[in-house]
Image (cartoon, rainbow, N blue to C red):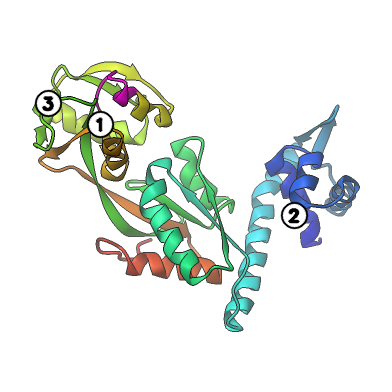
Amino acid sequence: MELRQVEYFLAVVEHGGIRRAATALRIAQPSVSQGIRALERELGTELFHRVGRRMVLSPAGTAFVRPARQLRRDASTVHSAVAGALGLEGGRLDIASEPALSVDPTARLVGLFRSEHPEVSVRLVAPLREAALTRLVRDGTCELGFGYLPQPMQGLSYQVVGTHEIVLVLPPGSPGAGSPASFAELDGQPMIVVPRGAAQRDFLGPLIDAAGVRTRIAVQIAHREAILPMVLSGVGATLLPLPRAEEAARRGAVIRRVTPPVTREVALFHRVGELSHAAQVFWDLAGESAEVGAGDRT
């Protein structure tokens, strides 16, 4: 089995077809098709069902996705280790990150890393659903991941790389700017919230309930990028991590710190096992620059 054939297979899976895979790989479509057929002959089974112009994974193809990604990751680790031993840099580092962490710590640490290792490209992947975050690392799509704790960390190693304070964000012109807010003040407050089952709501819900508060849901929305525009439009208030709240303040929203303070730990994690040279450098950099204790845990 050639690594090139595995790359072709994964490109078809990840880009949704042979034409897009060929474009992404910058090779001719027949080369991709021939590589897939050669891989299928070697494995003795079809990896895709051809349905018109579509390529649909067969049961065998579905089962092959995870080990194929591991093969790609192992090859990257080998190349990176050799490059590191020779004092060279290069390749690509794939990192998964919750959208709420895109500014801090993700952008901050990627900036530090790239300033020291400009020849290593970084690909950031945002999961479509919160539950997919750790899966992106477990299945080898990404080597590292940023997420809030708690997370299901079975089979993963992690270090705490920061904490985010949760603050109240209100529409422009709201009273109380600069003064702290207790959970009791949320009683009857129109709120913009994410659906039940979302980690942020599951984290904050018990705290609000413990304060005996009955919030009034103005809007429940799964699209987090729409929360801030709704606050700015006067629809209601919301609770956000401070880095995102600071962006809201720059656009006119009113921020009030919650008392007693509420914080969430931010973790960087990877699958148990050896990291590529680039990932190890990033891991060490994140630990050194952590705002809070960064003990490595498994």
Name which of mark 1 and mark 2 comes first in the sequence: 2
Residue occupied by mark 2: 7
243 vs 89, left or right, is: left
* On-image quarter of the N terminus: bottom right
Query: Residue 275, can we see it?
Result: no
Q: Which residue is label 3 attached to? A: 175
Examine the image and state in which quarter residue 228 appears: top left
| CA distance for labels 3 and 1 | 11 Å
> In the picture, residue 296 is in which quadrant?
bottom left
Residue 260 in percent (x, y) is at 10, 41
Q: Secondary structure at mark 2?
A: helix
Disc 1 residue type (three-letter): Ala
Looking at the image, is 34 positioned above or below residue 86?
above
Location of residue 207 (image quadrant): top left
Q: Nearer the viewer, mark 3 or mark 2?
A: 3
Mark 3: give few (<14), some (14-19) or many (20+) Cα within 10 Å: few
Q: Residue at x 40, y 68 (%)?
A: 285
Nearest to the observer: residue 133 or residue 223: 223
Q: Is residue 22 left or right of residue 176?
A: right
Q: Is residue 268 above or below residue 244?
A: below
Check disc 3 and report its element: helix, strand or loop. Answer: loop
Q: Amino acid at mark 3?
A: Pro
**Residue 231's spot in the image, x, y percent?**
30, 25
- As measured in the structure, the alpha-carbon distance from the residue carrying label 1 to the one carrying label 2 is 47 Å
Near-viewer residue (104 or 58): 104
- In the image, the segment drawn in magenta is 230-237
| On-image quarter of the C terminus | bottom left
Which badge, 3 or 2, is on the more N-terminal residue? 2
Q: Amino acid at mark 2?
A: Glu
Q: Which residue is mark 1?
A: 253
Q: Main secondary structure of the magenta part?
A: loop
Is there any visible trace of residue 122 in the rendered image? yes
